[in-house]
């Protein structure tokens, strides 16, 4: 099957060190069946993947976080509209006490979850696979 266009997206798996260990930030989208995923979005003209990831985190949860480019995960898949989506996620260690302010137009809900709960909450299998890779990396670090 040939695809219509390639959509390039970037974001980050935002995590923090909670009392029970590593916790992951998941966002529930307002569209596409209210799916749970990570902060991410489409690359805009002239942006690098890292710039996109940083901008999307700022837009979606009103946080300025440092994106860690030393580790990333990647997936691509076909969309219902016939396009092919390419997604790169970096890491972002959230070490602030600031609260989350959700982007009302796009984000319905958000929460911090331990690895097992986050894995269950993620809507799509490819995101579960990316979380598995990130969690294995962070556990080794």
Image: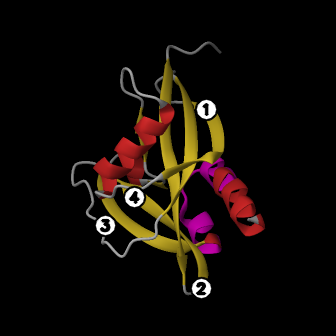
The residue under label 4 is: 28
Mark 4 lies on a secondary structure that is strand
| Residue pictured at 48% horizontal, 25% vertical | 7
Instruction: Using the image as rendered, state which of residue 59 and residue 36 is in the foreground.
Output: 59
Badge 2: how crowded within 10 Å, few (<14), some, or many (20+)? few
| Residue pictured at 32% horizontal, 50% vertical | 58
Image position of 14 with respect to 1: above or below: below
Mark 1 lies on a secondary structure that is strand
Magenta-drawn stretch, dominant element (helix, strand or loop): helix
Of pointers 2 and 3, the one earlier in the residue sequence: 2
The residue under label 1 is: 77
Whether residue 70 is visible, yes or no, is: yes
* Extent of the magenta region: 116-129
Image quadrant in which the C terminus is located? bottom right
The residue under label 3 is: 100
In this view, the mark in front (1 or 3) = 3
State the separation of the CA atoms marked 2 and 3: 20 Å
Residue 29 location, x and y as percent?
37, 52
- Drawn side of residue 55 relative to residue 123, left or right: left
In this view, the mark in front (4 or 2) = 2
Of pointers 1 and 3, the one earlier in the residue sequence: 1
Of pointers 4 and 3, the one earlier in the residue sequence: 4
Residue sitting at the far left:
104
Of pointers 4 and 2, the one earlier in the residue sequence: 2
Asked if marks 4 and 2 touch (Cβ < 8 Å), the reply is no
Instruction: Using the image as rendered, state which of residue 133 and residue 140 is in the foreground.
Output: 140
The residue under label 2 is: 20
Magenta stretch: residue 100 in it? Answer: no
């Amino acid at each position: 099957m040939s695809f219509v266009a390639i959509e390039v997206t970037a974001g980050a798996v935002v995590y923090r060190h909670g009392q029970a260990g590593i916790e992951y930030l998941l966002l529930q989208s307002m569209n596409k069946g209210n799916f749970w995923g990570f902060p991410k979005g489409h690359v805009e003209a002239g942006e690098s993947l890292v710039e996109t990831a940083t901008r999307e985190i700022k837009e979606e949860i009103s946080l300025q976080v440092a994106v860690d480019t030393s580790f990333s995960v990647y997936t691509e898949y076909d969309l219902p509209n016939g396009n092919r989506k390419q997604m790169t996620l970096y890491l972002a260690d959230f070490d602030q006490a600031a609260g989350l302010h959700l982007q009302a137009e796009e984000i319905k809900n958000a929460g911090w979850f331990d690895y097992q709960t986050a894995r269950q909450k993620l809507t799509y299998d490819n995101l579960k696979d990316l979380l598995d890779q990130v969690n294995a990396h962070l556990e080794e670090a």
